[in-house]
Image (tube, rainbow, N blue to C red):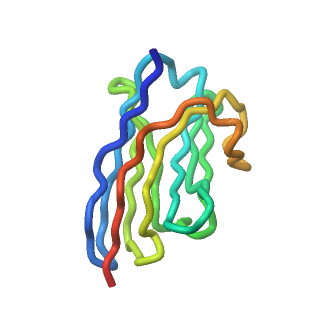
Amino acid sequence: EVQLVESGGGLVQAGGSLRLACAASGFSFDDYAIGWWRQAPGKEREGVSCISSRVGSTYYADSVKGRFTISTDNAKNTVYLQMNSLKPEDTAVYYCAATRSWYVEPMIFYEYDYWGQGTQVTVSS
């Protein structure tokens, strides 16, 4: 059974940092790329970052480039999203998801087969 479980969300002040984790089970990172998505109230779900161990590529949305870093720990089957210099506009529910796509960009919602339950990130001003 494929499962993705996010953790690490919380409340932080602007300028602070959080590290999200996505624990994956039931599949290999050799077969799937992992993306982080976020959805703020009243807004569409936005692709934030993606990593493919298979092709050794990463992608960042312009809105987070230079502030967020995605990485994998293959031994733990876990993907991390280190978020620094957080801004109030980063407030959203963050989801990790898995796709068989060979490409880390563009991040296309319907190409993601499996989703986690989400973790709330709130950045206060």
Q: Position of residue 97 (x, y in %)?
A: 53, 38
Residue name at image x 36 percent, y 41 percent: 6
Quick check: 91 above or below 114? below
Q: Nearer the viewer, residue 116 or 99?
A: 116
Residue name at image x 39 percent, y 26 percent: 77
Residue name at image x 70 percent, y 39 percent: 110
Quick check: 106 above or below 30? below
Which image quarter is the N terminus in? top left
Residue name at image x 31 percent, y 79 percent: 124
| Quarter assignment of residue 86 | bottom left
- Label tally: 0
Quick check: 40 above or below 101? below
Q: Position of residue 66 (x, y in %)?
A: 51, 67
Q: Nearer the viewer, residue 67 or 90?
A: 90
Q: Where is residue 15 in the image (x, y as percent from the top left)?
A: 33, 78
| Quarter assignment of residue 13 | bottom left
Q: Where is residue 100 in the image (x, y as percent from the top left)?
A: 66, 27
| Quarter assignment of residue 71 | top left
Which image quarter is the C terminus in? bottom left
**Which residue occupies the extreme front position in the image?**
42
Residue 20 horizontal side relative to residue 30, left or right: left
